[in-house]
Each structure stands twice: as structure tokens, then as C-alpha cells.
Amino acid sequence: MIPHAIVGTAGHIDHGKTALIKALTGQDTDRLKEEKERGISIDLGFAHLDLDDGRRVGIVDVPGHERFIRNMLAGAHGIDLALLVVAADDGVMPQTEEHVDILHLLGTRSAVVAMTKIDLVDAARIEAVREEIGTLLAWTMLEGAPIVPVSSATGAGLAALRAAIQARLTSLTRTEGPAWFRLPIDRAFVLHGHGLVVTGTAIAGTVREGETLRIVPGGELTRVRSVHVHNQAVREAYAGQRVALNLGGIGRPSVARGHIACSPALDRTTDRFDAWVEIRPGPRHAIASHDRVRVFVGTAEVLAKLIVLDSRSELGPGDAGFAQLALREPIAALRGDRFVLRDETSQRTIGGGEVVQPFAGRRRRNDPATLSGLAVLRAADTDAAVVDAVIALESAATLAPDFLMQAAHFTPERLQALLTSEMRVVALPNADTVEAVTSREKWDGLRAAAIAAVADFHRAQPRTPGIEMESVRSAVAPAVSAKVFRAVIDRLVAEKSLVRQESVLHLPSHHVALADADRELATRLTAVLGDAGWTPPDVAHLATTLAVPRPRVLGVLQHLEREGQVYRVAPDLYYAAAALERARAVIRDHCGAHPHITAATFRDLLNASRKFAIALLDYFDRTGFTLRVGDARKLRR
Ligand SMILES: Nc1nc2c(ncn2[C@@H]2O[C@H](COP(=O)(O)OP(=O)(O)OP(=O)(O)O)[C@@H](O)[C@H]2O)c(=O)[nH]1
Ligand SMILES: [Mg+2]
């Protein structure tokens, strides 16, 4: 059972929809002067019905005339239960058929059929029309709906109809987790003294007085001054209710039917989406690839070009498949939204379908990866599977979280829950501060490519310490921002797959190989420094004694430092590793027996000049071994 529900009428002109709503509720949904004069419905009408179980359900009454089909379409979305009206005297007529097609395409989940005007026919006719209706509904979402014969003139059957409506509504469920508020606007008008009011059927989420909403397209932000449901002021309103919102700070001309009032988090519109498209059976029902069509989503209507994504050049009667809709103007649409397709001049309903990926780029036709990716996304039935499929369909290695949320149709809470619990989804740099998101599969690919790029570089340039991070990025993931790529590298460094020194990357196993001449110099340098112990010659001195240019000496010393054979204690002063460790032991021993060590004591213990003692102590301070306290040093740990 759902707490809030909308009942929407459907059916051919003059079959008694408005009269039936009046008989059920006492309310007249024909509110325009022209409707009264002509005795037909032109635009949407609204009422509410009180059920015996205490629930009050919203009613949308649609016009049956084929000229007003656009108005019918604006009212037909968001309906929980369709009340299909078929007059017993006329039976099934063209708009009965078209409205059934539309309800089916919009995924209307439940229906009750009212066979009206039974006071005008005999029992045999009632049975004949009952059969016609059964045939019409076969193979549609409405198949199996109960058929209740009624007369609004005599009141016959009305109690049974109420009972049927209540029973159907009671069996409905809505499987909705946290969702963004969305209200496709069907009316926008200025109420004297109050400003702009918009109305519509809330299709998801909750809206509260005082909240900020966004109007899309356009993107303007507005404050909700007040919320009304069934002509009563309320603090909040929910999906499945007819809602009127008084909006602050926005003018009438910028808002109209077709716009949507929604959570401010929804800031993306689309002018190209991937969809599952279904063509209704029928003689003139076909859409050739690249044909122009009219798309109806929510209360919006927009011209578009349909591009069949598989190898077919056309979708014929009863066909279905993946297609892309390239829209002339941007609209607000999310994954799972249903839509109806009519021909360019809007003469007839041809088909419709479901939005699969709302923010699509151009796609190659008949591409197996695209087609299977769309099929996987359409069939995905867990949050993790949806996110996986959305990421797989994009060519980018990582996605921005706000794109992913809107493409997957997940609120931040839902995405966050996935990022912390689901191994298949990888957050960069981590789940607390998400800069980008990718799938386990793409992460593994990115990781392998980055490591391979570094390895390739080492093979090509074995004498170079490593490759610039930026070069790896442009080679393996040019579309990923430098900031996000840094997060990728940080993860690889943390798992010890790569080593980063400033902006240079190398494999942990990489050691620069020296040329033969340099190797010989390295041997001599380690020998000289080893013999010198605690009083090594500086770089300039080494260059003179060994008769080698200073830069070459420095280059080899740097290499030896990377290998851990020598340590750079001061800018021009290198120590052999063993000598440095012995000096460290001297301090540790002394501090074991004394509270601290002074520079003078250390100098005496080393039996070296003050220059060496100070350089070593500064080095130990810098590297965190000692702590300077006045003129003395203590061990840090
Ligand atoms: N005898 C009889 N007349 C009915 C019954 N229901 C409706 N009518 C009449 O049929 C005519 C059309 O009824 P509406 O309720 O306006 O029909 P509708 O389906 O709302 O028409 P549109 O909104 O224009 O599509 C009116 O003159 C009603 O009085 C019924 O059960 N019995
Ligand atoms: Mg009517």
C-alpha cells in the first residue's frame, strides 16, 4: 500500500470521464469557461477522492479530444492508477486506443476500467464491449484490469467502482529509497498578492516549506514560500501527491508547463539521451533512424531526432531496441523516466520508452560494447550494478561524483553508502573526500597502465631516475584531471606499486645503472668516503683529489645516495653509510647514560672538528633522530 496516490482518467471524447469524476467526488474538473460552453474538456482538471480507508487520492482528469492530446500527455505521467473510461454505447474508439498506448508506454502500473453509460444499453451490449476492452488491453501494461459497468446518470455501479479503485491502490507498492524531489510543472500562474504558483504531480522525493528548489531548464533557484495539497496548506508534500507551490523571487514568464521544479542538486539538463524504445503495433507505426519525432517527458514536449543504435535502419510496428534521442532543446530527464514519441507533426502516437543514460555523448552505431553496456545498465537491479554500468558506458577512466549521481539517479546518501561498502566502486582519493569515482574494472586497468608506462620508461631510459607524473598522465589517462591523477598515483604509492620523488615516478625495483666509467668512479668514491670516516672530504675536494669534474662526482654521489651507500649530510658533504650509522650510535649510547648531548661533547667523542659535529647534528635534527633543546640534543624517541 502506498500512502499517496494519483488516479488519472483516460478515454475517448465524450465517454463520460468528467461526469464520472463528478459522480464520484462531487467536484467539477472542467474549470474553463470554454469547457463549460462547449461541454468538452480542453485542459487538465483536478479533484480528489476520499477512499473508505481514509486516504485522499489526487485525481487528474484529461481531455479526450485528439486535438488536446498534448494536454492529456502532460497529465498522464506520474499516475499510479489509470481510470480508463469506455462508453458502453460507443465501445472502444480511436482515442481509447491511443490513450491505452500512452498509459502502456508511460509504464502506468495499474488500471481500472469504467464502462460508462450503461443506462443507455442492454446487457448483451455490455458483454460485447467488455470483450472489446479485453482485446484492447491484451499485451499491454493494463492487461487484466477489472472492468466495472457504471452509469453516472443513475449512480449504478459507482460503489463497485470505488471498491475496485481502493482495492487496486491498496495492492500498489512504491520501492523508492531516498530520492530527489521532482515536480514536472503542469500549470504556472500568478496569484494576486502571492506571486508565482506552480502545480504538478510530484513524482519523487519530498518538498518542505522554506526549501530552495531549482527550476529546470534555466536552472534558476527559488524559495518555496508555501506548499498546498488538495487546496490545503501543508508543511511538506510527497511523491504521489498533487502539489501547488508558491515560489519566491521568480517571474511568471520564465516558468511554464514543461519545466520541472526539483532539488537544487539536479543541475544537469540533457539534449541527448540513450533510451530503450518500443514501437506500438499498428499500420502506420514506424520510425526510421534519423527521423524527427516529438518527445513527451513529464510535462515537457520537445522535437528530436531518433537514431537507432543497432544495425536496423528502422524500428517497425511492435519493434523495440536501443536508440538515442538528440533533442532540439535541453530538458530535465533522469534514468528510468518514461516518455512518449509522436510523429513530427504530432498526428499520432508511435511509441515511447525509457531513459537509460540521460547524459549521453554521440555514439557509434552498431557498436557491440555500447549495445551490451546499455543492456547491462537497463537490466541493473542493484545500486552497485547501476554505478558499474554507468561508469562502463563512459569512455573516461574516472567520473566526477556529481555527474555519476545524476546519471545513475542516486542521491549523495545513496552513492556514499556504495562508496563505503562496495568493493566494485572505487573512490579517489578515498570515500571521505571523493574527487572522482571509477569501477573496480577501470581502476585495475588504470593501475596496470600507469605501472606499465613507468616500466616502459625505465626500459627505454635505464639511466634516468624516473618519469614525470604528468607524462604518465598524458600517456594513460589524458582525460583525467591532474588533481584526480595525483590521487590515482597516491594510491599506487601507498600500495607500494610505485615510488614518487617529488613529481618523478619510478618502480620500487628500479635502480639507475651506471656507465662503466662511472661505476669505477663510484667504487673509488665509496672507498675514499669509507676511509675518511667521520671527517670526509667535501665534494670540491673529492673532485680535485680524484681529478674528475665536480658535476660528474656529484652525479655519481647522488646515484650512490639513491642506493643508500652514502648520505648527503650537508649540501657539499657526503658520508659513507657506515660512518653515519656509527655517529648515530655514539649519540644513542651517550643519551642512554645522560639526559642529553651537547655539540662540544659530540665533537670530542668524534674526535673531529666542530664543522663535522655541527653538520651531523643538524642532519640528525632534520631527519627526526634528535631534537635540539638550547645548545644540546635529546633523542626524539
Ligand atoms: N446517459 C448517460 N450520459 C452520460 C453518462 N456519463 C456521461 N454522460 C454524458 O456524456 C456527455 C459527455 O460526458 P463528459 O463527462 O463531458 O465526457 P468526457 O469523457 O469528460 O469528455 P471529454 O473530456 O471532452 O473527453 C455529457 O453530456 C454527459 O452528461 C452516463 O453514465 N449516462
Ligand atoms: Mg471531460
Image: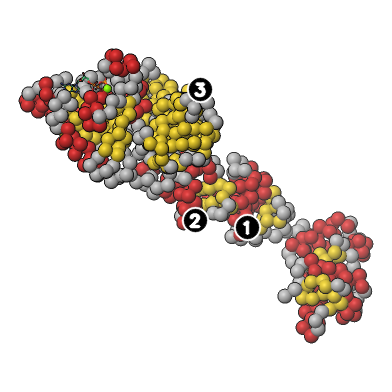
Q: Is residue 44 above or below residue 502?
A: above
Q: Residue at x 80, y 69 (%)?
A: 621
Q: Earlier in the sequence, mark 3 or mark 2?
A: 3
Q: Identity of the amino acid at label 2?
A: Thr
Whether residue 324 is visible here, answered yes or no, is no
Q: Position of residue 105 (x, y in %)?
A: 31, 31
Residue 574 found in image quarter: bottom right
Q: Position of residue 273 (x, y in %)?
A: 45, 32
Cα separation, mark 3 vs mark 2, equals 45 Å
Q: Identity of the amino acid at label 3?
A: Pro
Q: Residue at x 86, y 77 (%)?
A: 598
For disc 1, the marked residue is: 493
Q: Earlier in the sequence, mark 1 or mark 3?
A: 3
Q: Position of residue 539 (x, y in %)?
A: 88, 62
Q: Identity of the amino acid at label 1?
A: Val
The foreground one among 321 and 221 is 221
For disc 2, the marked residue is: 420
Q: Which mark is in front, 1 or 2?
A: 2
- The reply, left or right, for residue 497 in relation to residue 391 is right
The quadrant where ligand 1 appears is: top left
Q: Earlier in the sequence, mark 1 or mark 2?
A: 2
Of all residues shown, which one is farthest toward the front? 193
Label 2 crowd bin: few (<14), some (14–19), many (20+), radius 10 Å: some
Element at badge 3?
Answer: helix
Cα separation, mark 1 vs mark 3, equals 56 Å
For disc 3, the marked residue is: 253
Cα separation, mark 1 vs mark 2, equals 21 Å
Element at badge 2?
Answer: helix
Q: Which mark is in front, 1 or 3?
A: 3
Of all residues shown, which one is farthest toward the bottom? 593
Disc 1 to disc 2: CB gap under 8 Å: no
Residue 303 found in image quarter: top left
